Image (cartoon, rainbow, N blue to C red):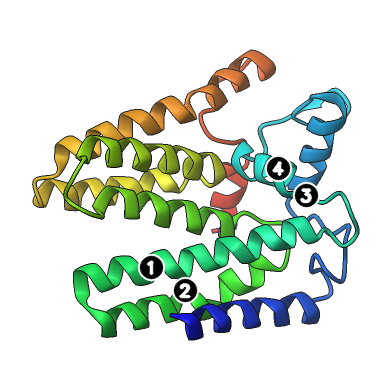
Amino acid sequence: VGVLAGLALGLRAIALAVFDDSLLRSPEGDPDAYRRIARSVAARGEYALAPGRLTALRPPGYVLAVLGSSSRSDPDYGLIGLHMAASLAAVGATYALARRFAGPPAAYAAAALVAVDPTLIRQSAVAMSETTFTALFAAALGAFLWGDGKPVGRSVAAGVFLGLGALTRPIAVACWLAVGVAGAAARRTGPWLVATLVAALVYLPWPIRNYLALDEAVATTTHGGYTLWLG
């Protein structure tokens, strides 16, 4: 596992050094406006792209991560550190889950896929949410599936991680529905429902905020249509 962790960190360090728009080489790089929104929240308490221009273009999970981790420096070593830590968490959680259910060979293979995934490597070098989301969803799966004792406590923990994941990337909802189908086959519907309820409670403030601030119902973001057309 140590080798895979080192590989993951090494490849992400190379990405930081190689790509012109990386957090290391282009400190002001902000392709998806997460840092701009975070600065607005910090400076004016507005979830906005510009003063008075409130938005739901991006979900708040990664924005809050930027606020909590940013070193307010150029380069932003705090945010770089967050991405490195999230990468390690994703590799470690994948290895642990695969080892428990499929054995060591499958665990090494699964963790290696996460460590060398080109998209995760590329996005870890810039202010984008994929790395953080992957770690959160892996944590949700780990809490939901790991161990046999205290199922309610594990389901609550899974729901918290899932809710944070959905606030980071709404695709978590579709992923969790797939987990629910598998859970039903394994007779784990009860714990899945508990986790889903907790996740909904964690997520609920976001659509409420959108309705109050934007005067319209936005359950996830206003970016979905744009992404659909790109697809």
Q: Nearer the viewer, mark 4 or mark 2?
A: 4
Q: Nearer the viewer, mark 1 or mark 2?
A: 1
Cα–Cα gap, marks 2 and 3 = 25 Å
- Number of disc labels: 4
The residue that appears at 33% across and 53% down in the rendered structure is 141
Mark linked to residue 70: 3
Q: Secondary structure at mark 3?
A: loop
The residue that appears at 72% across and 82% down in the rendered structure is 14
Cα–Cα gap, marks 1 and 2 = 8 Å
Cα–Cα gap, marks 4 and 2 = 25 Å
Question: Where does label 1 land, which residue?
Answer: 94
Does label 4 or label 1 sit earlier along the sequence? 4
Q: Amino acid at mark 1?
A: Thr
Does label 4 or label 2 sit earlier along the sequence? 4
Question: Where does label 2 land, which residue?
Answer: 114
Q: Are marks 4 and 2 in contact (CB under 8 Å)?
A: no
The answer to whether 11 appears left or right of 53 in the picture is left
Does label 2 or label 3 sit earlier along the sequence? 3
Residue 169 position (above or below residue 93): above
Q: Secondary structure at mark 1?
A: helix
Does label 3 or label 1 sit earlier along the sequence? 3
Q: Secondary structure at mark 4?
A: helix
Q: Are marks 4 and 3 in contact (CB under 8 Å)?
A: yes
Question: Where does label 4 land, which residue?
Answer: 68
Q: Are marks 1 and 2 in contact (CB under 8 Å)?
A: yes
Q: Amino acid at mark 3?
A: Ser
Does label 1 or label 2 sit earlier along the sequence? 1
Q: Amino acid at mark 4?
A: Gly
> x and y percent of residue 221 in the render?
59, 36
Residue 17 position (above or below residue 188): below
**Mark 2 surroundings within 10 Å by alpha-carbon count, few (fewer than 14), some (14 through 19), many (20 or more):** many
